[in-house]
Image (cartoon, rainbow, N blue to C red):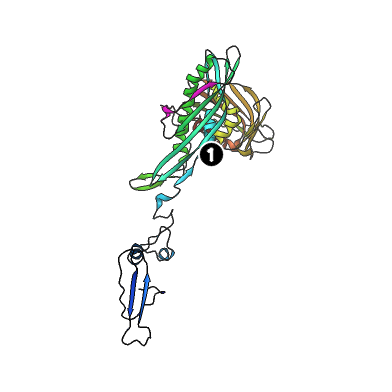
Amino acid sequence: MGDASWPEPARSTPHLLPTGSPLQLTFSRSSSSSSTMSRRLFTARLDSFSCRKKTVRPHTNVGPQPHSAERGGAGARLPPGTARHPHRRRTERDASNWSTERLKALLLPVRVEGEEGACEVTEVSKLDGEASINNRKGKLIFFYEWAIKLAWTGTSTTGVKYKGYVEIPNLSDENDIDEVEILVSLAKDEPDTNLKTLMKQEGAKKIRDAIKTYISTLKTEFTQGMILPTVNGEHTEAAPQVAPKARDSKTAASSSTATAQSKSIGVKIPTCKISLKDTFLTSPEELYRVFVTQEMVQAFTHAHAALEADKGGKFQLLDGSVTGEFVDLVPEKQLVMKWRFKSWPAGHFATITLNFTDKGGETEVCLEGKGIPASEEERTKQGWQRYYFEGIKQTFGYGARLF
């Protein structure tokens, strides 16, 4: 029998009875045995399936078998994430926190204007739900389900303000973007106004565009580092996202003529000028708001920020790596600031001027920087291009048209 608790007598013959019947094992006395036991009846009720599993089939536990793994035999089971199971690594990623911040950043800038006046989203008052990405056998599967409530304010041409709400009850991967409900209403006790119609028609379109951008970035930006679907049977990982290099005059940073100057600001060091130019698919008003609204700055820099968007107001960006002060603010037109990177000599600030030009459906931004430390010229240009311009485009969808 082979079981230590059941010693095998000489020339004994076991008889297996049908399932459910007692199993009678009779051991006959051997002629050569000196035992005084002539006959003993052992009765046990055994499950025949259990017997077959134990005596015929090898164990097939799901968990790893250390003795097999150590030998490296064919039956060895390795933990997920090894070369034998490459598709099982990082099979799921929670995107809920990322989605919460991204949805807020995309919905807060929504603003529309018409003959009746203007309407804008002022608050994301409810954002309940979850989002995740699963990798199943090399295929990325996206799950998201959100119930959203926004507060909006409308201002008529005569200056009268109205308040209302926007509800999005069914933002889900089960619904196409055109099936997502966007319900616009006025707050309790608010009189009827044409601004509600403006928000219901034009405002809803912009909200839908913001949702479309969220879904698009969820499927591209947030999949960094996850294993992508197979290509020719081989699994590949998503490469870290790099800000795309501009290929045309609209997105390319103009080459700056950096000439070291003897001028200095704060302390006497060699300085230079820089200039950059870029185009964003949004209005000057909305783009201006991105630069002066704390929540939106935090969204596109992906870091803590604090700012006071007033003349003389201070600001801190990128967890304190960038600091400065607003010198002049002309809404939709110009932004002038004292600006410094923390590695610069103590007390030294450059002067950064941003000019916003309406190009009919898009906005051109021209940056002029004066007093940049000569040794920091390229680093400053690359920082503005990457963390400001490209960051804004990727976060708010201002870099490409949505069809």
In the rendered image, residue 178 lying in the magenta stretch gets the answer yes
Query: Which is more toward the observer, 378 or 78?
Result: 78
Name the quadrant of the C terminus: top left
Q: Total number of numbered labels?
A: 1
Would residue 105 appear left or right of 139 to someone viewing this image? right
Picture coordinates of residue 8, whole percent (x, y): 36, 77
Residue in front for this viewpoint, 99 or 302:
99
Compared to residue 136, the image places residue 361 above or below, namely above
Crowdedness of circle 1 by 10 Å Cα count: few (<14), some, many (20+)?
few
Disc 1 target residue? 97
Q: Which residues are magenta?
A: 175-187
Q: On the rendered structure, is 210 left or right of 31?
A: right
Q: Quadrant of residue 229?
A: top left
Residue 233 can be seen in this image: yes
Location of residue 400 with respect to 196 vertically, above or below? below
Asked whether residue 172 is drawn in magenta, I would say no
Q: Quadrant of residue 79?
A: bottom left
**Image-based side of 145 in relation to 308, left or right:** left
Q: Nearer the viewer, residue 370 or 210?
A: 210
Which quadrant would the N terminus be assigned to in this image?
A: bottom left
Report x, y in % for residue 151.
57, 25
x and y, in percent, of residue 384 in the image: 55, 33
Q: Quadrant of residue 223?
A: top left
Establish if 50 lies above or below 89: below
Give the image location of residue 281, x and y in percent: 48, 25
Residue 255 visible in the picture = no
Q: What amino acid is found at the position of numbered circle 1 in the picture? A: Asn
Describe residue 105's horizontal placement relative to residue 10 as left or right: right
Look at the numbered disc 1 and give the secondary structure of its residue: helix
